[in-house]
Amino acid sequence: WMVAVFGIGACAAGVVASRHPAAVAMRRWRWGLIAALATAIAATGVLLLDQLQAPELPGGDPVPYYNWSYRVRWIYDLLAALATSAFVVWLALGRAAGARGSRAAGRIRSLLESRPLCTLGLFSYSLYLTHGLVLVATVRLTRFLEGSPDLRAAVVTIVSVPAALAFAYLFYRLVERHCMSAETRAMFTPAAAGPPGAQAH
């Protein structure tokens, strides 16, 4: 299903940048409404999955749906891919002067292209690679906390989020940065954040 997720993203890029007549026609669709509907469907799908009853472990604990077999796990990935791709298309097409929803899209783009978020995007792949290590370590180090599971979850969140960001940035500086070209690093500056193909329509 990851191939399908990649394909959805590739189709979204085609809608924004391709000169094919079908892509040009699709650029006239109401992508803001499509993105909102896709997001609502994805959220509803995940909520319904959360309500499903999974087989229990030998100790009697229920198994979260995201740990089920691959027969179930593909669903929320595809739902998220559809919603995210529609949202990105709406943002990209909203750059055009007079485009439907361009003002709202422009505000969101300004936020996403702000310096703090562009900096986060610069080492986001390192964050993707390493955050699980930090989270697991934090969970194991907080085993001594007894009582309310909500208290422990709050402590884990408060500790692991800044720790994961710091560790990921260090990993980026020591490892990932040396594998990136100057052109790739320049993509994460606010002035260059817009996709060049977004003006093709």
Image: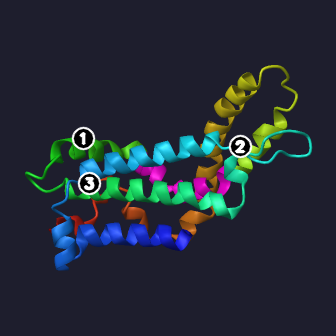
Number of the label disc, if any, that sits on residue 107? 1
Work out how far the residue at label 3 is from the one at label 2, CA to CA, in angstroms.
36 Å
Work out how far the residue at label 1 is from the one at label 3, CA to CA, in angstroms.
12 Å
**Quick check: 53 above or below 121?**
above
The residue located at (44%, 49%) in the rendering is: 119
Work out how far the residue at label 2 is from the one at label 1, CA to CA, in angstroms.
41 Å
Give the percent coordinates (x, y) of residue 106: 22, 45
Image quadrant in which the N terminus is located: bottom right
Number of the label disc, if any, that sits on residue 90? 3
Q: Residue 60 vs residue 52: left or right?
A: right
SS for tag 3?
Answer: helix
Question: What type is the residue that disc 1 sits on?
Answer: Arg
- Closer to us: mark 1 or mark 3? 3
Question: What type is the residue that disc 3 sits on?
Answer: Trp
The residue located at (66%, 44%) in the rendering is: 52
Upstream in sequence: badge 3 or badge 2: 2
User: Which region shows up in magenta?
Assistant: 117-131
